[in-house]
Amino acid sequence: MAYVVSFPGGVKVDVKSPSGHVISTDQPVEAGGQDSAPQPFEVFLASIAACAGFYALRFCQQRSISTDGLKIALDVRRKPEKKGISDVDISVVVPDGFPLKYRDALLASIESCAVKKNILDPPAFHMSLVN
């Protein structure tokens, strides 16, 4: 299962997933880019939010709970020395009428996010040059 990187020009970087989807990234203008796509770090953070959203969505779908008005916000706080993030806050806004008995279970479901689990138990990284 390989993700293949290509360089379409400037400082743009595209990644083709094994399923054939292409994720495009770019840099802001002040960093030499065209700001035509999210930065790689934004894609990383978006993957956490999307994963939490997916788990919330599936939780509601499996219980026939409407997702109208359901919102998830991800906010990060950076380390003082600006080298990474210190905290990730995920806020879930449930709509009026969301069943009280499912509130804790919804949060527990979101805790199961596979992206978050891999951050908390990170894989080993192995780099190599290939000719």
Image (cartoon, rainbow, N blue to C red):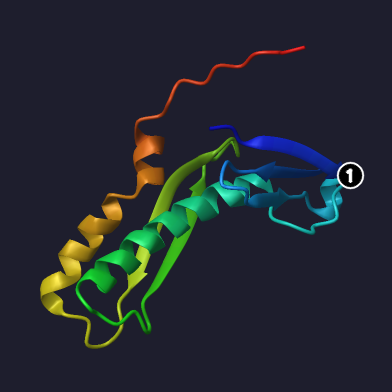
From this view, report whether residue 44 is shown above or below residue 72.
Answer: above
Give percent across and percent down for residue 125: 52, 21
Q: Secondary structure at mark 1?
A: loop
The percent coordinates of residue 44 (x first, y second) are: 55, 46
Residue at 22% over, 81% down: 98
State the residue lying farthest toward the bottom: 97
Residue at the image point whose x is 79% and y is 53% from the top: 28
Task: Specify whether 21 is left or right of 7.
Answer: left
Quadrant of residue 107 within the rendered picture? bottom left
* Nearest the eye: 95 or 130: 130
| Residue 79 locus on image (x, y percent) | 52, 40
Q: Tell me residue 74's x, y (percent).
A: 45, 60
Q: Is residue 23 above or below residue 130?
A: below
Residue positioned 84% across, 45% down in the render: 8
Instruction: State the image quarter where residue 127 is shown.
Output: top right
Quarter residue 120 falls in: top left
Q: Outermost residue toward the left?
A: 101
Q: Which residue is mark 1?
A: 10
Count of numbered circles in the view: 1
Q: Quadrant of the C terminus?
A: top right
Is disc 1 surrounded by few (<14), some (14 to 19) or many (20+) residues within 10 Å? few
Question: Three-letter amino acid code at disc 1?
Answer: Gly
- Residue at 22 percent across and 87 percent down: it is 97
